[in-house]
């Protein structure tokens, strides 16, 4: 037997209504905030991710699925959606369009991580990117969309955490202070963080290892190295969130794993997700478009993990839009089977969902399948019914039955479907 790949999951039909509900809710909120869907490729040249996400990040250092194309070009399965979206923005010269470019996307992402609950190698994200506006209201808009979407799903125990990373220059001022402090405490840090002192010292701040956290509690704070401009910007974001009543917590450790962020960074966590508690995260990335050789373009966005949302979503919260009546066609006998095939087609073409099990050849077997499939009604058509030209519509709950003319089936059936 050939099995699926570790950390790469199938979503069986029992689970997809949950996913569709989440995706429909996300689409509705993205529409309301004026974000338009973009569909970008699942693989890109490797340099796109290496250059945008940053060489010394977890993703680029050890999580990418990279392979050689037949001509030797290095390609990578996308580990996230921002790099591809920005590449498309530049390639199609979207900066020349005189309205804000606000995109949303859905789709699978690929990272070579240790699979566990809420951490997969193929996982799915919903994300948005708002390009072109260097205004705290653009940050607020993106954060509000994320918060309203998650709240609408009824997810419990959510917290929005937010931090100010300042401008690149602010981080350059801060970096030597932090590095000096970390060197003094080097021996107490985990191996990973000892290495990060040289490569990516800010990441030490959000290490989960207790010893590292204890040491960084006493470290100099980025907040103390921020320029007035960066402070003012962030104050604008917090005032906006207060105004529209989005609750948040300040978290000075929130530095995020990707190099391209500046100013606002944020993350939504859930108390009942265990170790993998991040539902979604994002921030401002004013330098990225330029890093990828595009025109200077301020931008802000987020991405949420759909697997983690699916884990948090209560069964009772799921409202499916496909709640229409499903009719089971119980056709048997030589003539009845053919009339049943016509009836199925008539119903479907006139907009009514209809199913059957072609293996069943007796009425009893058919009705059992109708119950198993949860159909509210069965349409019974045996050879006798064909001779009379009428099918029998049976309400599977009340067991009441009605005769219907097979020649005008869909018109005759409509009013009866509302009787329960
Ligand atoms: P984590 O700290 O959990 O590794 P991250 O910082 O790597 O998350 P981002 O790159 O910000 O995550 O991606 C945004 C969201 O995508 C995360 O908050 C999470 O919900 C989801 N996500 C990230 N990696 C995975 C994964 N391997 N499996 C499932 N979901 C994931
Ligand atoms: Mg990660």
Image (cartoon, grey):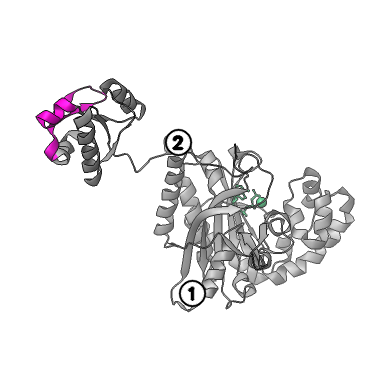
Q: Position of residue 383 (x, y in %)?
A: 17, 27
Q: Is residue 406 left or right of residue 219?
A: left
274 vs 198: above or below: above
What is the quadrant of residue 172 in the picture?
A: bottom right
Q: Residue furthest left?
A: 388
Q: Pick the residue in front: 149 or 290.
A: 290
User: Residue 173 placed where, x, y %?
Assistant: 76, 69
Q: Is mark 2 within 8 Å of ligand 1?
A: no
Judged from the image, the secondary structure of the residue bearing numbered disc 2 is loop
**Which residue corresponds to mark 1?**
94
The secondary structure type at the circle numbered 1 is: helix
Looking at the image, residue 382 lies above or below residue 286: above
User: Per the image, is 403 magenta?
Assistant: yes
Q: Is residue 350 left or right of residue 104?
A: left
**Residue at (33%, 25%) from the top-left corner?**
371
Q: Quadrant of residue 76?
A: bottom right
Give the position of the N terminus as an image quadrant.
Answer: top right
Q: Position of residue 350 (x, y in %)?
A: 21, 45
Q: Is residue 330 visible?
A: yes
Q: Position of residue 352 (x, y in %)?
A: 25, 41
Q: Which residues are magenta?
A: 383-408
Q: Nearer the viewer, residue 365 or 397?
A: 365
Query: Splitting the image into 4 quarters, where does residue 302 fall?
Result: bottom right
Task: Specify which label sits upstream in the sequence, 1 or 2.
Answer: 2
Residue 4 is covered by the magenta coloring: no
Residue at image mark 2: 14
Residue in the image at 51% along x and 54% along y:
107
48 and 276: which is toward the camera: 48
Marks 1 and 2, how far apart at CA:
40 Å
Q: Residue at x 45, y 76 (%)?
A: 97
Of the 4 image quadrants, the one containing the C terminus is top left
> Is residue 402 visible in this depiction of the protein?
no
């Amino acid at each position: 037997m050939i099995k699926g790949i570790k950390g790469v999951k199938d979503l069986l039909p029992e689970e997809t209504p949950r996913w569709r509900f989440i995706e429909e809710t996300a689409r509705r909120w993205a529409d309301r905030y004026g974000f338009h869907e973009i569909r970008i490729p699942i693989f890109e040249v490797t340099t796109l991710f290496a250059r945008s996400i940053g060489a010394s990040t977890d993703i680029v250092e050890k999580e990418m699925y990279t392979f050689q194309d037949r001509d030797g070009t290095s390609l990578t399965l996308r580990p996230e959606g921002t790099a591809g979206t920005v590449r498309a923005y530049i390639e199609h010269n979207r900066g020349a369009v005189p309205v804000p470019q606000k995109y949303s996307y859905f789709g699978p992402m690929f990272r070579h991580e240790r699979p566990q609950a809420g951490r997969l190698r193929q996982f799915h994200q919903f994300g948005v990117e708002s390009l072109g506006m260097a205004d705290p209201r653009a940050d607020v808009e993106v954060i509000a969309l994320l918060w309203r979407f998650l709240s609408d799903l009824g997810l419990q125990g959510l917290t929005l955490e937010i931090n100010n990373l300042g401008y690149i220059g602010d981080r350059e001022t801060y970096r030597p202070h932090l590095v000096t402090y970390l060197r003094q405490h080097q021996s107490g840090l985990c191996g990973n963080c000892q290495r990060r002192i040289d490569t990516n010292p800010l990441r030490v701040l959000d290490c989960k290892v207790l010893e590292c956290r204890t040491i960084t509690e006493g470290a100099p704070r980025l907040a103390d190295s921020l320029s007035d401009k960066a402070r003012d910007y962030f104050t604008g974001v917090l005032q906006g969130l207060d105004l529209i009543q989005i609750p948040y917590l300040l978290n000075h450790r929130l530095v995020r794993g990707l190099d391209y962020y500046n100013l606002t960074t944020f993350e939504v966590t859930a108390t009942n997700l265990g170790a993998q508690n991040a539902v979604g995260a994002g921030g401002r990335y004013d330098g990225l478009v330029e890093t990828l050789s595009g025109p200077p373009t301020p931008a802000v966005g987020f991405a949420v993990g759909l697997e983690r949302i699916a884990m948090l979503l209560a069964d009772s919260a799921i409202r499916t839009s496909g709640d229409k009546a499903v009719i089971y066609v119980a056709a048997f006998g030589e003539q009845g089977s053919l009339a049943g095939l016509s009836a199925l087609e008539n119903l479907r073409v006139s907009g009514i969902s209809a199913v059957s099990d072609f293996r069943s050849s007796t009425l009893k077997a058919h009705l059992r399948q109708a119950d198993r499939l949860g159909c509210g009604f069965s349409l019974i058509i045996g050879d006798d019914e064909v001779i009379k030209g009428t099918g029998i519509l049976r309400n599977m709950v009340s067991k009441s039955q009605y005769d219907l003319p097979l020649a005008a089936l869909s018109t005759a059936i409509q009013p009866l479907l509302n009787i329960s």
